[in-house]
Structures are given as structure tokens and as C-alpha cells.
Image (tube, rainbow, N blue to C red):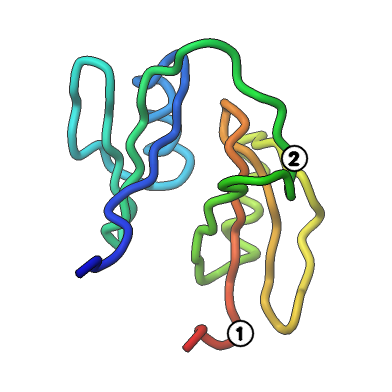
Amino acid sequence: MINGIEHTAIATPDPASLAQWYVDALGFVINYRGKTAFFVKAPDGTMLEIITSDGDAPETAMKTPGLRHLALATTGFEAELERLKSLNVTFLTEPEIRSGNKVVFFTDPVGTILHLIERAEPLP
């Protein structure tokens, strides 16, 4: 039986630096340090594995095939948005309300698309 997703991996030429960005910018903690990989954990327990990349990154866009973004749940959307702006993150969209949900898309330093969302009502 599959119980869920344990982690998602992001490849980068500098795993230590990207792992630290997730700590500094998004409030994750580094919960494992290896020779070529770091695991970072969000306050809710979800994890990302930051691994060493090989070669150049392929060109990606919001809707090309494959994994497209990681959604980050928040409360206090406006405050979090302003905090991210103060960190000079690269925003891909303007903040908006979709079906009652507050959303905005931005990237981490290696171009991973991140989606900040505050839902009006949780999904079932």
C-alpha cells in the first residue's frame, strides 16, 4: 500500500546553497546533510531532497509536461507575499484570487516553480 509522497527532489549545482535558501526564505529546516544531498523539512513535515545536478537544466514553463510546481500552503497570504517580495524572489504571476483562493507563482534560485496558496476552503 502506498501511503503518500515522502519527498520531492530538486537538482541543483549547489545543493547546500539551495537548501539554505529554503531555510532562509521559506522557514524549512535542514533535517539531513549528506555528501551530495540535503533534505529540508517544512513546518508541516513535508520534505524536499536537494541533490547535485548533472548537466544543464531543460527549459520549462508553467504547463510543459512533467512536474510543474510545488504548492506551498499558507495562512496570512498578504504578509507572506510581502515577506517574499522583500527577499526579491522572482514572481511569475501577479497575486490573484481564483475561486476564492489567494494564489501567486514564483521561483526558487534554480527556477523551480513554487505556488503560494491560501485556500478559502480546504480540499476534501
Tell whether 40 sits left or right of 80: left
Proximity of marks 2 and 1: CB atoms separated by less than 8 Å: no
Which residue bears the numbered disc 2?
Answer: 61
Q: CA distance from mark 2 to mark 1?
A: 27 Å
Element type where label 2 sits in the image: loop
Q: Which mark is residue 120?
A: 1
Q: Residue at x 33, y 36 (%)?
A: 49
Tell whether 34 sits left or right of 53: left
Front residue of this view, candidates 75 and 44: 44
The 10 Å Cα crowd at callout 1, few under 14, some 14 to 19, many 20 or more, is few
Which sits earlier in the primary sequence, circle 2 or circle 1? 2
Q: Residue at x 56, y 47 (%)?
A: 67
Vertical position of residue 65 compared to residue 36: above or below: below
Vertical position of residue 54 compared to residue 108: above or below: above
Tag in front: 2 or 1: 2
Q: Residue at x 65, y 64 (%)?
A: 78
Specify the farthest residue to the top: 55
The 10 Å Cα crowd at callout 2, few under 14, some 14 to 19, many 20 or more, is few
Residue 22 place in picture, x, y as percent: 42, 38
Specify the farthest residue to the front: 1
